[in-house]
């Protein structure tokens, strides 16, 4: 699952709890927001600082999520 985050990461951490057998990649361009969410990390949750307009992944995602739409 890929979360194109707009928020403090609380919802992203909850999503990671729902897919314990999967992985969640959380993407946000803000350094401050990424530092704020690190304590909410899980074993299956990875935080990336990136601009979603320039994403380039070799892997595929089963789900792309954003609560900013």
Image (spheres, grey):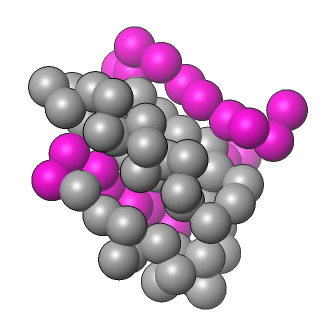
Q: Main secondary structure of the magenta part?
A: loop
Q: Is residue 22 above or below residue 31?
A: above
Q: Is residue 42 above or below residue 49?
A: above
The answer to if 46 sits in the magenta stretch is: yes
Farthest residue, direction top: 62
Residue 56 shows up from this direction: no
Residue 64: quarter of image: top right
User: Residue 66: horizontal and vertical position, in percent?
Assistant: 68, 35
Residue 46: quarter of image: bottom left
Which span is picked out in magenta? Answer: 43-69
What's the residue at 48%, 83% (across, down)? 35
Residue 7 shows up from this direction: yes
What's the residue at 72%, 55% (across, down)? 6
Q: Is residue 41 left or right of residue 47?
A: left
User: Residue 44: horizontal and vertical position, in percent?
Assistant: 20, 45
Q: Is residue 2 left or right of residue 64?
A: left
The answer to if 55 sits in the magenta stretch is: yes
As rendered, which of 52 and 38 lies closer to the eye?
38
As rendered, which of 61 and 37 lies closer to the eye?
37
What's the residue at 52%, 81% (across, down)? 36
Residue 7: quarter of image: bottom right
- Quadrant in the picture for the N terminus: top left
What's the residue at 60%, 76% (across, down)? 33
Q: Is residue 27 above or below residue 32?
A: above
């Amino acid at each position: 699952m890929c979360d194109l985050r707009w928020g403090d990461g609380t919802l992203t951490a909850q999503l990671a709890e729902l897919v314990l057998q999967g992985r969640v990649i959380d993407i946000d361009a803000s350094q401050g927001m990424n530092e704020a969410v690190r304590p909410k990390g899980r074993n299956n949750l990875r935080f990336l600082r990136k601009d979603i307009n320039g994403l380039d992944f070799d892997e595929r995602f089963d789900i792309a999520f954003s609560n900013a739409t």
